[in-house]
Image (spheres, helix red, strand yellow):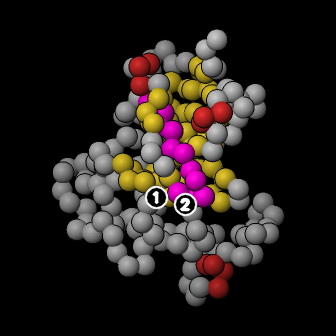
Amino acid sequence: MTANATEPPTDNPFLTRPGARPEIYTLGHRHPQGVVVVDGVPYAHEHGARGGDELNRIEPGANYGWPITTGGIDYTYARITPYRTRAGIEPPLVDWTPSIAPSGMAWYDGALFPAWRGSLFISTLKEGSVRRVPLAKGSPGPQEVLFQELGERIRDVRAGPEGAIYLLTDSANGRVLRVVPSR
């Protein structure tokens, strides 16, 4: 991919699609919240409605389905669509139904928590946790729910250069927490 900050990437698949705006890279996202790049591959997560929160590996020109496919239902409890999958639509790597309300996302490859290396960390608002999603060759493994004992919505998560995990809570007295191994 080559481009400057004001131009679409020269390998953008929509550059040659008649009638498409050159800024479009993918389709069918509902409400993206976090994006990280791992080994040159972008991953994004997004809110569904009542369920249907997703983690996706972003592929050039792919359609991620909204509103044609979803695992969620409308806030009024009406069905948005009868389809969870359709030909030509990229299925999510992970679907969270019921909703966890993903917020921030970070890639962890630090030294302080060796068992957590190679994992996405996804902060959640509704669940009040951080989901650790290990990735092996781009495929998600079993998730671990962390920090739920704080009893707070977690707005963002970051991996510090020293290997600590930083959490931003979203309560009336929001906090920035630095997580390091206990001694």
Which residue is painted at 69% across and 40% down in the image? 109
Which residue is painted at 63% across and 44% down in the image? 118
State the image quarter where residue 165 is shown.
top right
**Left or right: where 92 falls relative to 67:** right
Q: Which comes sooner in the sequence, label 2 or label 1?
A: 2
Mark 1: amino acid: Leu
Q: Are marks 2 and 1 in contact (CB under 8 Å)?
A: yes
Q: Is residue 88 above or below residue 172?
A: below
Residue 155 location (% of width, % of height): 50, 32
**Left or right: where 119 falls relative to 27:** right
Residue 57 location (% of width, % of height): 55, 60
Quadrant of the snapshot with the N terminus: bottom right
State the image quarter where residue 39 is shown.
bottom right
Which residue is painted at 79% across and 67% down in the image? 3
Mark 2: amino acid: Arg
Q: Is residue 116 magenta?
A: no
Give the label on residue 93, or none.
1
Q: Secondary structure at mark 2?
A: strand
**Most foreground residue, 113 or 6:** 113
Q: Badge 2, how many Cα within 10 Å: few under 14, some, many 20+?
A: many
